[in-house]
Structures are given as structure tokens and as C-alpha cells.
Image (cartoon, rainbow, N blue to C red):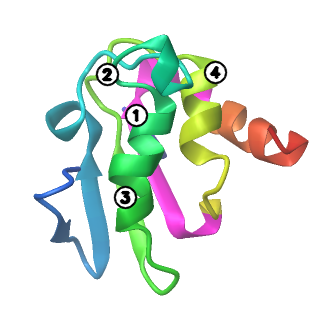
Amino acid sequence: MIGVIFAGSKNNIRNVNTMKYFNVKDEFGMYLGGGLRSTGANSGQEFWEDYLSPLLDPHEMIEIDFRGIVTFSVSFLRESFKNVDLSRVKIIFDDEFDYLHSMVLNLKQKGE
């Protein structure tokens, strides 16, 4: 079974039933880094600034697919989604990362 909370490509976006789709593993990488660019490659800041932010549209939904990702860090998630209206985003992830949905929601509620 697949957990759902997010799901693409910076240059390879397609509409899925009027929803944009982004596959993180294929378009960004399967090894996610820390929160800030200064901490190294594949940071949450890089994901937000270079990939996710340009895709967001206040009138469209987006599916962000994290299936196949090997690692997650709280700092990556914080930087990636701190400015995102989660009501416009659907996140998809593998079952072993089932806890991510509540983690992202908790970070948003705390204002982190």
C-alpha cells in the first residue's frame, strides 16, 4: 500500500486529471539532503526555490511523489514546505515513511 500526502520534474510536468505531477526521485534525486543549501546537495531550500516554488499555482493542485526516496530529514521537509499551502498539494510516499504526513502537518502548525 502507498501512503498519500505529496508527488515530478522541473522540466517534465504533466497534468494528471487537472493536477500537476512532480516525481522527486526522477527529477531531483533519491537522496535528500539537509534544510539549507549551505549544508550540501539536494537541500530542502534547493527543492523549494528551484523546483517546487516555480510549479505552484494558486489555482491548481500538485501531486508530489516521494516514492523511491531513500532518506528524509526534518530540516529538508521544513525548508521544502514552510511556504506551501498544503490544501493545494497531494504528497505520495512509500509505506515505510507513513509518518511524514503528520510530520509535515505538525511543522506547518508550529510555524516552522
Image x and y of residue 80, in percent: 54, 41
Q: CA distance from mark 2 to mark 4?
A: 14 Å
Of residues 78 and 102, the one drawn nearer to the viewer in this rendering: 78
Asked if disc 1 and disc 2 are in contact, CB closer than 8 Å, the reply is yes
User: Sequence order check: which comes first, mark 2 or mark 4?
Assistant: 2
Q: Quadrant of residue 111?
A: top right
Asked if disc 1 and disc 3 are in contact, CB closer than 8 Å, the reply is no
User: Sequence order check: which comes first, mark 4 or mark 3?
Assistant: 3
Label annotation for residue 74: 4
Q: Which residues are magenta?
A: 87-100
Q: Amino acid at mark 3?
A: Glu
Q: Amino acid at mark 4?
A: Val
Q: Amino acid at mark 2?
A: Ile
Q: Quadrant of the N terminus?
A: top left
Label annotation for residue 63: 3
Asked if disc 3 and disc 2 are in contact, CB closer than 8 Å, the reply is no
Question: Callout 4: 10 Å neighbours few (<14), some, many (20+)?
Answer: some
Asked if disc 4 and disc 3 are in contact, CB closer than 8 Å, the reply is no
